[in-house]
Image (tube, grey):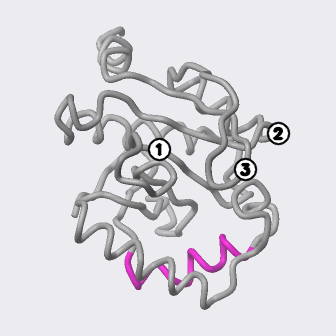
Amino acid sequence: MTILSTERLRLEPIDDHHFDGLQAMNRLPEVMRFITGAPETPEQTRRMIALLKERWAHHGFSWWAFIERETDRLVGAGCIQHLGRDPASPHEIGWRLVPDKWGQGLALEAAQAMAGWAFEAFEALEAPLLVAVCLPENANSARVMQKLGMRYRGEETWYERPHATWEITRQAWQERSATP
């Protein structure tokens, strides 16, 4: 399983030892407002961790816990997964952060690491692009998608709700990464 590093974060594949940090984050209404709309229970967090561990074992990718290097605290989570949890769909990149870390550039920092890893780890035919979705009213996530170099492709239904949908192709990522 792949651990990613950035200047301020260590991205660790989610495992049982992340339970306390994930539950602390996912039980916050302000975190879950744009995801499921409801705080997560401890049992839901346990089930999610079990599922994500299976995905790591089966696919070699899933969700990472964002660990702040300075404090060793879980401050977020993010993923590369199949959009809509359907292996026939493109790969999705996603993230969430604890509220006291919003607006500090950590989502973009983590997203850049995850996107870079995905485009390096997967063959061109397996991952010609990455897609990100957010509820239309989630302007902060949409800004991260823009800063990541993603192109808005419209409103689409994913996860049983309309979402603003963004994408970046492998070629656009490589061109962006090559530009100083």
Prevailing SS of the magenta stretch: helix
Q: Nearer the viewer, mark 3 or mark 2?
A: 3
**Distance between the Cα atoms at labels 2 and 1?**
18 Å
Q: How many marks?
A: 3
Q: Quadrant of the N terminus?
A: bottom left
Residue 124 lies in quadrant? top left
Residue under the point 70% across and 31% down: 155
* In the displayed structure image, the side of residue 142 where residue 18 appears, left or right: left
Mark 3 and mark 1 residues within 8 Å of each other at the beta carbon? no
- For badge 2, the amino acid type reads Glu
Secondary structure of residue under mark 2: loop
| Magenta-colored span | 15-27
Q: Which mark is residue 137?
A: 2
x, y percent for residue 17: 41, 84
Query: As rendered, which of 21 and 26 lies closer to the eye?
Result: 26
Mark seen at residue 161: 3
Describe the element under mark 1 as helix, strand or loop: strand
Instruction: Say if mark 2 contacts mark 1, CB within 8 Å.
Output: no
Q: From the viewer's perspective, is residue 42 above or below residue 74?
A: below
Which amino acid type is marked by label 1? Ile
| First in sequence: mark 3 vs mark 2 | 2
* Nearest to viewer (mark 3 / mark 1): 3
As displayed, is residue 55 above or below residue 162? below
Residue for point 60% across, 23% down? 146
For this rendering, which residue is in front, 164 or 118?
A: 164
Identity of the amino acid at label 3?
Arg
The Cα–Cα distance between marks 3 and 2, rounded to whole angstroms, is: 12 Å
Q: Position of residue 10 (x, y in %)?
A: 38, 57
The numbered disc on residue 93 is 1
